[in-house]
Image (cartoon, rainbow, N blue to C red):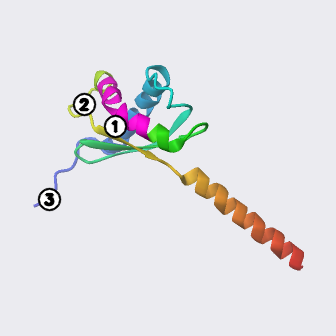
């Protein structure tokens, strides 16, 4: 039997994008935890049944581990705020994960620069 197709293509991506926008506003305006500094939400991945959402974030200033703990502790408060804003049947449970992509990119750039400078010295 063929799998049932969603009536709206890419609905999961649209929901994830809306969750990201709403969470950004909720964190910046309504979350009063001092452990949460300047947080940037990089991406949101939603499970197909909308039960869970993995929220990837980065931190400009502050301790990433403390921020992750604070965001995961505030997940219920943020989920309640999403419930009031989103018009979907199931608002996902939020799981915050620190995104190390920018750190890895900086490390790779440093390695490339080091390789280029050592090659230039050899020539």
Question: Is the Cβ of the residue at disc 2 closer than 8 Å to that at disc 1?
Answer: yes
Read off the residue under disc 3: 2
Where residue 47 is drawn, which disc sits there?
none
What is the number of the mark on residue 88?
2
Please determine whether, in this image, residue 122 is positioned above or below residue 10.
Answer: below
Nearest to N terminus: mark 2 or mark 1: 1
Of the numbered discs 3 and 2, the one sitting upstream in the chain is 3
Which residue is painted at 36% across and 34% down in the image?
Answer: 73
Mark 1 highlights which residue?
A: 15
Marks 2 and 1, how far apart at CA: 9 Å
| Of labels 3 and 1, the one closer to you | 1
Q: Is residue 113 left or right of residue 43?
A: right
Q: CA distance from mark 3 to mark 1?
A: 25 Å
Q: Work out which quarter of the rendered image holds the N terminus and state it.
A: bottom left
Cβ atoms under marks 3 and 1 closer than 8 Å: no
Q: Which residues are magenta?
A: 69-81
Q: Position of residue 29 (x, y in %)?
A: 48, 20
Indicate whether residue 24 is drawn in magenta.
Answer: no
Q: Earlier in the sequence, mark 3 or mark 1?
A: 3
């Amino acid at each position: 039997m063929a799998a049932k197709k969603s009536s709206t293509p890419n609905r999961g991506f649209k929901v994830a994008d809306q969750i990201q926008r709403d969470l950004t506003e909720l964190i910046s305006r309504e979350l009063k935890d001092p452990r949460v500094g300047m947080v940037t939400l990089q991406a949101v991945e939603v499970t197909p049944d909308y039960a869970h959402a993995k929220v990837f974030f980065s931190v400009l200033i502050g301790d990433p581990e403390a921020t992750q703990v604070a965001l995961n502790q505030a997940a219920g408060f943020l989920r309640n705020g999403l419930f009031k804003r989103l018009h979907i049947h199931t608002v996902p449970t939020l799981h915050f994960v620190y995104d190390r992509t920018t750190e890895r990119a900086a490390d790779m750039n440093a390695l490339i620069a080091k390789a280029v400078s050592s090659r230039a010295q050899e020539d």
